Amino acid sequence: MFYRENGQFKTSYQADQQIFPIRQDRIAMLVLLAVLFLLIPAFASDYLFRAILIPLVIMSLAALGVNILVGYCGQISLGSGAFMAVGAYGAYNFFVRVPDMPLIPAVILGGLCAMAFGILFGLPSLRVRGLYLAVATLAAQFFSDWMFLRIKWFTNDSPSGSVSVSHLQVFGFPLDTATARYLFCLALLVVVALLAKNLVRSAIGREWMAIRDMDVAAAVIGIRPMYAKLSAFAVSSFIIGMAGALWAFVHLGAWEPAAFSVEVSFKLLFMVIIGGLGSIMGSFFGAAFIVVLPIVLNQFLPWLFGLFGAQISTAGVSHAELMIFGALIVWFLIVEPHGLAKLWSTAKQKLRIWPFPH
């Protein structure tokens, strides 16, 4: 009764092919955007912005890029942290070496650097697949770690390898507050998510999914595997590189190569698997799960032990957090292997047929 397509007639091809064909979806999306852009900045604290919201928005952008490669094209990658690092250091070099370089072009140029890097390490996907491809992309992670540690030009000849940026501005407006940084990252995320949603519904998106399902059959019907796979690496690396630039410039401010270690690559892959492979919405769900849950557990466990008159050390909280976090990941994969996005899709389907489940 609350979620029906009946009576919502389409009179043009454009209306029939819109991203949100159901009126309730369009209303819900407008309400969500109003909450994100208006309500949250009005009431959220500085701690909430810096500890949760800004990392969540940036990691959602990175997970979106990983999902295009892993979820839509089926190419397993463990080099996402390297692509973020290339995007961060590429944007940094453009930002400090080009006089008066604006922030947005620097972030885009960092994404283009990551795109070139991703295409280079995506070449093995033309010959290998599965775990072999995962190992090949893992080589990108170790290569980037070595490159940014040993080649001082990338760090502007910094002796420690640590670099920093300051006085960020967008169209003349300074990003000196947590609210301004959050709104900037959120606006960029909305634009990229909208473009990605249209891209995966286009011809190239269908080619990616055909390669994912069966690359031999896709080649038989005329799809070029080389073009499809490398284009997926290019688009994915570009988005991840932009996320890396935002993570370095907006969230960290000062960073070193260890900020983009292989642990970041695994986290991004977990976000996609938990959120849902081949789902734009799943990227947001997975990022929320990975980013928010450890913070919640860190606050909840001392409170829980305090109810029973016991105390738990900081190290104990850290170990318990990892144990619970790992157990929840395994539980989600067993109960719903298609991710949290599948649960969301099932809930929407139940609303469509309620109260007549037959």
Image (cartoon, rainbow, N blue to C red):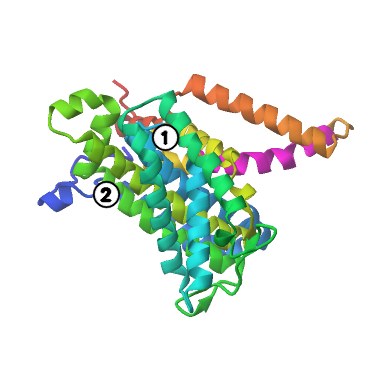
Q: Is residue 84 above or below residue 333?
A: below
Q: Are marks 1 and 2 in contact (CB under 8 Å)?
A: no
Q: Is residue 38 above or below residue 10?
A: below
Q: Position of residue 137 (x, y in %)?
A: 45, 36
Q: Position of residue 267 (x, y in %)?
A: 55, 38
Q: Is residue 323 left or right of residue 271?
A: right
Q: Quadrant of the C terminus?
A: top left
Q: Which element is circle 1 on?
A: helix
**Residue where numbered disc 2 is placed:** 198
Q: Given the image, on which type of amino acid does mark 1 rest?
A: Ala
Within the magenta stretch, is there residue 114? no
Residue sitting at 45 percent across and 63 percent down?
A: 107
Tell me which numbered mark, 1 or 2, is placed earlier along the sequence: 2
Q: Position of residue 291 (x, y in %)?
A: 59, 43
**Residue where numbered disc 1 is placed:** 341
Residue sitting at 81 percent across and 33 percent down?
A: 316
Residue sitting at 57 percent across and 42 percent down?
A: 264
Q: Quadrant of the N terminus?
A: top left
Closer-to-camera residue (92/324)? 92
Which residues are drawn in magenta? 286-306
Q: Is residue 299 above or below residue 134?
A: below
Q: Is residue 340 visible?
A: no
Give the quadrant of residue 306.
top right
Q: Position of residue 296 (x, y in %)?
A: 67, 41
Q: Given the image, on which type of amino acid does mark 2 rest?
A: Asn
